[in-house]
Amino acid sequence: MAPPFLDRWSDSSALQLGVLGVGNIGMVHLKSALAMPGVDVVAAADAMPANRDKAASAGATRTYDDYTTLLEQEDLDAAVVALPPFLHADAVECAAEAGVDVFVEKPLARTAAEAEAMIETAREANIALGVDHTLRYQPDMTGVKEAYDEGSVGHVPYASITRLNDHPLGKPPADEAPPAWPMDPDAAGGGSLIELGVHCFDLLEWLFGDLEVQDATMGKTLNIPAEDAATVLLRAPETETTINLHCGTYQWEQLPEVNTRLRLEGVTGTISNKEHMPGNFYAGAAKAALSNVASRFTGGEPDVFGPTFYLQAHYDALEDFCDAVRNDEEPPVGGELGLRTLELAETAYELAAEGDGAELEPPEVMT
């Protein structure tokens, strides 16, 4: 039975939400919440003054330089945790003390053990714990799942997924130095496998059920502390599918270009996410921009996430979390799913270290 999360707030008022961390992805969540019916963004917190200014300009009612102060002073129903991974556990603990439901940016934690502790904290405090795994919300991925579930290609003996971007260095020329924490394995939990691979693990188990990690290798194309490439061999026992997963942070990505490729090789054909991309994508983006301008004069609701389905997926994931809280239900992507992706990542790190003569050790997190 789902815990009674809604005892703390009334259906007669909008859900009062705060955003903890308004950097790149935090601003996506902030703008998602601002555009969401039945949600009031009452506050945002960030240590960087420039980020607080952006949040205020976007529509956050109040801003704080510390998330703990925000949680102490604001009467919230829910909070988005978009802080660096090394702060996730503390933010969830602070939210639990305040009785605030939390939607945590992936990875849920830096290690499986840290995630388990966060889940227990949420359980003891009777708060909802959701995780932002958004690949399952992208229309190209939902299209693949629908086609697969319909049996359009029959049994799928083999599948592959590739997810690439340029995190954390960005596209040259660099205007400023990147943040330090994404390249620090102790702060981030790892490299590309944690940054991108956990998304892929979540998507693949959504498609095929429980996965087994059979082998893995890590690579460094750049002189940075953690891996910027990871390849993992997986097996899905339930569907008898062998899967090759590759993720890397060595290729530039300019949204709305898509650097995620999923292929299911079935016995009667192939399903690819490219077949399910939104039609007339760039034309749709331009149309959405014009619609947004018009809505300012007509009072209509802006389609602020029309230009890229990546952003729409983040909106949908947060909306699902908010709806679950309102309906007294467990979040559809909860802490246990976030924990599962970290367990798979840790197994991959261990196998890679064994196979490569410990070229890259699993990150040791200081707690």
Image (cartoon, grey):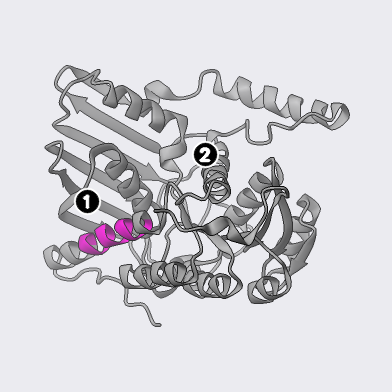
Where residue 46 appears, as percent x and y from the top left, is: 67, 67
In the image, residue 136 sits, relative to residue 248, either above or below, namely above
Residue shown at 41%/23% (left/top)? 276
Residue 295 is left or right of residue 120, and the answer is: right
In this view, the residue in front, 301 or 107, is 301
Q: Secondary structure at mark 1?
A: strand
Q: Is residue 82 visible?
A: no
Tell me what residue is drawn at x 40 percent, y 67 percent. 119
Q: Residues in magenta?
A: 338-348
User: Which amino acid type is shown beneath numbered disc 1?
Assistant: Val
Residue 297 falls in image quadrant: top right
| Residue 302 pos. (x, y %) | 73, 32
Q: Quadrant of the image for the C terminus?
A: bottom left
Mostly what secondary structure, the magenta segment? helix
Q: Is residue 1 left or right of residue 308?
A: left
Image-quadrant location for residue 239: top left
Q: Is residue 110 magenta?
A: no
Examine the structure image and report whether residue 346 is included in the region drawn in magenta.
yes
Residue 194 vertical position relative to residue 139 in the rendered view, above or below = below
Res. 186 mark: none
Residue at label 1? 232
Residue ID at (63%, 27%): 285
Measured as percent of width and height from the top left, residue 97 is found at: 57, 75
Label 2: which residue? 313
